[in-house]
Each structure stands twice: as structure tokens, then as C-alpha cells.
Image: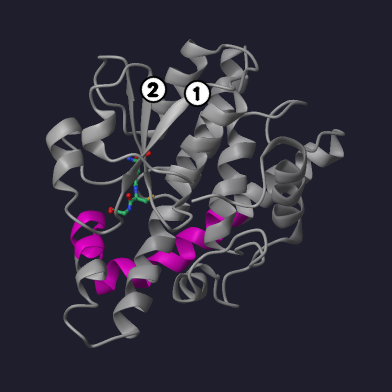
């Protein structure tokens, strides 16, 4: 992925999308695929994970990623507002169901996967722990220090995290199993939606795809890989492999 610098992108028109560079950060990956899927052009702007990103902060008020800035509108950072921006710019192909019942199911699923306190949030607490365990060098600990301060890391929170992840993964697997019994391979209804896209990206935080498809740094790969104690129903991995194969580009680009 070619990244523009903030100073070269901030005065441009159209969509500018700040993404974490060099790692498959699932929130950034999902935002990127949302716009790619809809063929919405954007300028990718580089965010450095775990750093202060003063230029990005000066421009958008945020230090992390993703941040979507469309024309002169306010920056959007949450997954919900990023999906809705994409739906407005390019309603087709749609990623949000038409009925309120299906929409509430879909947004509920993504909440469990990607919102504060959800699956990825909990996995990240464990990941921060592993980054700390990897080194005593204060310089190397700057990244986990920054992530710990941003994302609510504490020994108690880490202790609770695995059970929350297990519960959410079981719910997602049950959902896919129920859908399969109705003849659907997708999380909601019979078609690809943002829930399928988000799970595909966020599944990397439990079972990263092999090196040729997801060429991520080796230490980070170890931290993304779920421990054997976290049960991962094969239906979850079969689903994400299908979604990438049918709807998303590979290899991952970050
Ligand atoms: N704002 C996003 C979550 C963003 C987020 O958690 N970003 C992380 C993961 S990609 C990040 O930028 N981490 C590196 C950092 O904080 O510098 C949302 O609520 O949907």
C-alpha cells in the first residue's frame, strides 16, 4: 500500500483514509475494504501504530486509525459512521440490509466483533500483554505502553478477556450454523453484508491467514494467534476464507 503523508493529503478533496501502516490492524483493514468493495477512490494516509501521530492529530483530532475524512466534512473514526459514509457515497453495491430487522442484526454482530469491549477489544488486551512479555527494553515497551493507555489494559481486564472472547466466538459460530441450516453462507439474510466483511478482517486476530496471504510481522503474528484455550469453531474460519475468496482482495495489503 502506498501511503501519503498527512501534509500532502489534508488539503485534497474527496476521501482521505488514515490507516495503520505495516500491520493488518483489523479496524483499518475493514474500513479499507468497505471503500474498495464499493469502488470509492481514496487517498491512503499513513498512521503509525502506537505513536503520537502529531500531524494526524492536528488535522483530525485523532491519533489512531482508521480516520475517514470526506471533502470538508468532520472526520469519522467509528466503524458505524465509516460504513454509513460509504453507503452514502456509493449506495451500490450495498453492504447494509434494507430492512430494520436485518440491519439491527447486522449492526449488533459488528458491535460484538469491533466495538469497545467486544471481541477485538478483548483480544487486544491479551496482545498488549504479550508485547510486554516480549521485552524489558523501555524503548521497545513504548508501543505497548501507548496501546495500554489508549485501550484500557490492566491485569484484571486481561483476566476477564478470554471468557468474553470465547462467548462472542461461540455466538458467531452459532449464528453461522443457524444460517447454514437455512441455506445461507452469510451472517445475515442471503447476501454479503458489512458483518461478513468485518468478521473476515477481525478473524485475523484469532487465526491469521498464512504468510503468503497475510505477510504480517512475525512477533505480531504470534500475538494475533489465539491461544489453544480459546475455542474457534471451524465454521468461523471457513466463512472468512469464503468471504475473502468471493468478495475481498488478497493478499492483505497494509
Ligand atoms: N475508532 C475505531 C477503533 C480504532 C482502533 O481501535 N484502532 C486501533 C487498531 S487498528 C489502532 O489504531 N491502534 C494503534 C494505535 O492506537 O495507534 C472504532 O471505534 O471503530
Q: Few, some or many C-alpha atoms within 10 Å of disc 2 (few <14, some 14-19, many ≥20)? A: many
Taking depth in this image into account, of 80 and 177 the one nearest to the observer is 80
Is the CB–ligand 1 distance for label 1 below 8 Å?
Answer: no
Q: Position of residue 188 (x, y in %)?
A: 68, 30
At horizontal 65% and vertical 17% (from top left) the residue drawn is: 93
Residue drawn at the location 44% of the way across and 58% of the way down: 23
**For the magenta stretch, what is the residue range?**
146-169
Contact check, label 2 and label 1, Cβ < 8 Å: yes
Query: Which residue is denoted by mark 2 in the rendering?
Result: 15
Q: Does residue 241 appear left or right of residue 34 in this picture? A: right
**How far across and how far down the image is residue 60, in percent?**
19, 32
Q: CA distance from mark 2 to mark 1?
A: 7 Å
Residue 231: image x %, image y %?
63, 68
Lateral position of residue 217 relative to residue 132, left or right: right
**Residue 19 drawn above or below residue 193:** below
Above/below status of 78 relative to 206 = above
Query: In terms of sequence position, does the residue under pointer 2 or pointer 1 come before the other?
Result: 2
Q: Residue at x 62, y 55 (%)?
A: 170
Disc marking residue 72: none
Name the residue beneath numbered marker 1: 41
Is residue 163 rendered magenta in the image? yes
Q: Residues within 10 Å of mark 1 (few under 14, many from 20)?
A: few
Q: Is residue 104 magenta?
A: no
Looking at the rendering, which quadrant does residue 175 occupy?
top right
Residue positioned 21% across, 35% down in the render: 7
Magenta: main secondary structure equals helix
Q: Where residue 133 sits: x, y (%)? A: 33, 84
Amino acid at each position: 500500500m502506498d501511503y501519503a503523508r498527512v501534509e500532502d493529503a489534508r488539503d485534497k478533496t474527496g476521501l482521505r483514509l488514515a490507516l495503520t501502516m505495516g500491520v493488518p490492524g483489523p479496524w483499518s483493514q475493514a474500513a479499507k475494504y468497505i471503500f474498495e468493495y464499493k469502488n470509492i477512490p481514496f487517498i491512503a494516509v499513513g498512521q503509525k501504530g502506537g505513536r503520537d501521530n502529531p500531524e494526524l492529530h492536528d488535522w483530525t483530532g485523532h491519533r489512531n486509525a482508521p480516520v475517514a475524512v470526506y471533502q470538508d466534512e468532520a472526520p469519522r473514526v467509528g466503524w458505524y459512521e465509516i460504513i454509513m459514509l460509504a453507503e452514502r457515497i456509493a449506495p451500490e453495491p450495498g453492504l447494509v440490509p434494507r430492512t430494520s430487522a436485518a440491519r439491527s442484526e447486522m449492526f449488533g454482530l459488528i458491535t460484538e466483533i469491533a466495538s469497545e469491549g467486544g471481541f477485538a477489544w478483548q483480544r487486544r488486551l491479551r496482545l498488549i500483554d504479550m508485547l510486554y512479555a516480549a521485552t524489558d527494553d523501555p524503548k521497545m515497551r513504548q508501543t505497548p505502553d501507548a496501546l495500554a493507555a489508549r485501550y484500557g489494559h490492566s491485569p484484571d481486564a486481561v483476566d476477564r478477556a478470554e471468557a468474553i472472547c470465547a462467548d462472542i466466538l461461540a455466538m458467531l459460530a452459532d449464528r453461522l450454523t443457524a444460517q447454514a441450516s437455512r441455506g445461507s453462507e452469510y451472517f445475515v439474510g442471503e447476501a454479503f453484508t458489512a458483518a461478513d466483511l468485518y468478521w473476515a478482517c477481525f478473524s485475523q486476530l484469532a487465526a491469521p491467514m498464512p504468510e503468503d496471504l497475510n505477510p504480517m510481522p512475525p512477533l505480531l503474528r504470534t500475538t494475533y494467534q489465539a491461544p489453544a484455550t480459546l475455542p474457534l469453531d471451524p465454521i468461523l474460519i471457513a466463512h472468512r476464507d469464503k468471504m475473502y475468496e468471493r468478495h475481498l482482495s488478497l493478499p492483505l495489503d497494509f
